[in-house]
Amino acid sequence: MAKPALVPSPYKFITQNFASTKKSPFGSGGVLAPSDNVKKVEIVSAALSAGYSGGNQLSWNSSAVVVSNHGTHLRQYLGHRLQMVSACLDYHSGRVVPKAFFTSIETSEKAALSFIAGCLGTHLAARRWLDAAGRKMVSFLHAGIFTKATVVLPSSLLALNKTSKRLPDYLVCDSAGEWHVFESKGGTVGSRWPQIVDGLRQLEGITGVGLASLLSGPGSVAALPAPTTKVCVQTLLEAGRDVSVTVVDPPGNTRAPSEPKASDTPNLELNLIPGVADLLLFLESIDWFYGLSEGPLPADDTRFSIQNWIFNRSSAFGGLVIGIPLVFAKIEERIREKMSLYLAVQEVLENLSSSHIASAREGLPSPPRDQFIEALSQHPMIARFAVENQNSTRYSPESIYEEISQLLGRNKNRPVGSLHAWALSLGLNEEANLLHDGSAAAGQDVLFLKLLQEGPEAERTFVTGTGMYIQVSEPPSGQDADDMTTFTMPRG
């Protein structure tokens, strides 16, 4: 009887099957720098963008969206959580090093710190990954957002992930409209290579990512485009040594050791409903703005007297100036109402669903009329909107059912399932485009551009993908600016 083949160690598997590269494997093929100076403001931006998925238990729900202080209070908590990470790191002369006491931290806390550091490292690496290809980051979606934006139910994705570990940490869309899948890992000494191999296994099953499009006729949904790249990012924390980030993009014909055949593991396609993820990102930015704000800026600081912007001060991360385009505040209430209604119908469909879908390409059909209407009428948020809009039938259970059914009954321009139909009825993509346009217009204001491009503030400012403005405080007099604004993250 033949002996089973030996499975190589994670380190040997990586070194035997992967080669170091100095160029991007896609796009313009630009040079990937071996190390980078990362501004402090970039780290803050990563901290506010890397998300909080609660272990993929999905923090967004219909009640949390409509109650604005829910998100504000959550962001305040997350701000303290991020400060805990910062307390463990020492910044000096362009370097970031875990402090000596890091070795004494309790194991579960160290795991939490490593997880958060891994998320930050992934966001920073993703930006540089795209920059080298001549692309810009358009969307950085964590699992807490993109699982709420697919044509199937979040529980379907979670059920699949529970059995096959195929749900990625992040979906990233670039300026060419192409999608990339990122798996984030963070750990301490000895964890790097096993974590990377584990991440490669998770990435293998992602076969398609894209935005749902209207169907031109009968038949199933066409296969989604494959991700342009699938990237595992591991951030290593070791007391007394520079934080190290390792980025691995697996070649298509390489399998992780001891991995079963592809036919034995379900593939995963992520068909995203246009507008949904964008609106959740905008709401996250609004929540961060109010969660971090501690009051207006001094009246004599005329630099921030810019039309179509709101600026506030914050003591978080050593002191910030934060801003959002005025259009965010103007239509926030309407966006919260529509997203609450969208998520409420999603939750009703969750309760009515008796089976989970292995592929996230196909959408859900509409449930039987009487069953659907009864379930809608019992949902607290839909009942609330019905009471608040007694003079209109717009959001009654009956009208919700009819609107979804009519859209699904089209012969042409038919949506991909009930959730896609409901998002179309609510006009979520149009609302997202309105916010994008308003944010872009605010970003082109002459005084705002001057703020970004002139003076010492230019090196300490950053504008996130949703248009949120971040400026870190000027270092105290006599202190090396590098100690406050930059540190080096060498590529592992």
Image (tube, rainbow, N blue to C red):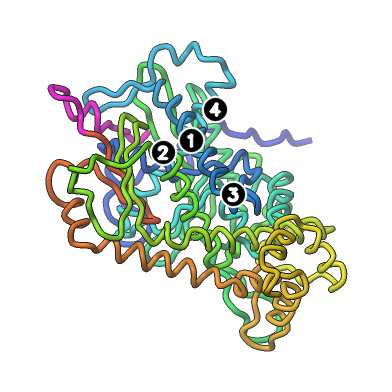
Secondary element at image label 2: helix
| Label number found at residue 76 | 1
Residue under label 2: 292
Residue under label 4: 112
Which badge, 3 or 2, is on the more N-terminal residue? 3
Q: How far, Cα to Cα, is label 2 from label 4?
A: 22 Å
Residue stretch in magenta: 474-492
Q: How far, Cα to Cα, is label 1 from label 2?
A: 7 Å
Q: Residues within 10 Å of mark 3 (few under 14, many from 20)?
A: some
Nearest-to-viewer mark from 2 and 4: 2
Q: Where residue 453 sits in the image (x, y, percent)?
A: 16, 52
Q: In what quadrant of the picture does the N terminus appear?
A: top right
The amino acid type, in three-letter code, at marker 2 is Leu
Q: Where residue 203 sits in the image (x, y, percent)?
A: 57, 49
The amino acid type, in three-letter code, at marker 1 is Gln
The amino acid type, in three-letter code, at marker 4 is Ala
Q: Where residue 450 sits in the image (x, y, percent)?
A: 16, 55
| Label number found at residue 67 | 3
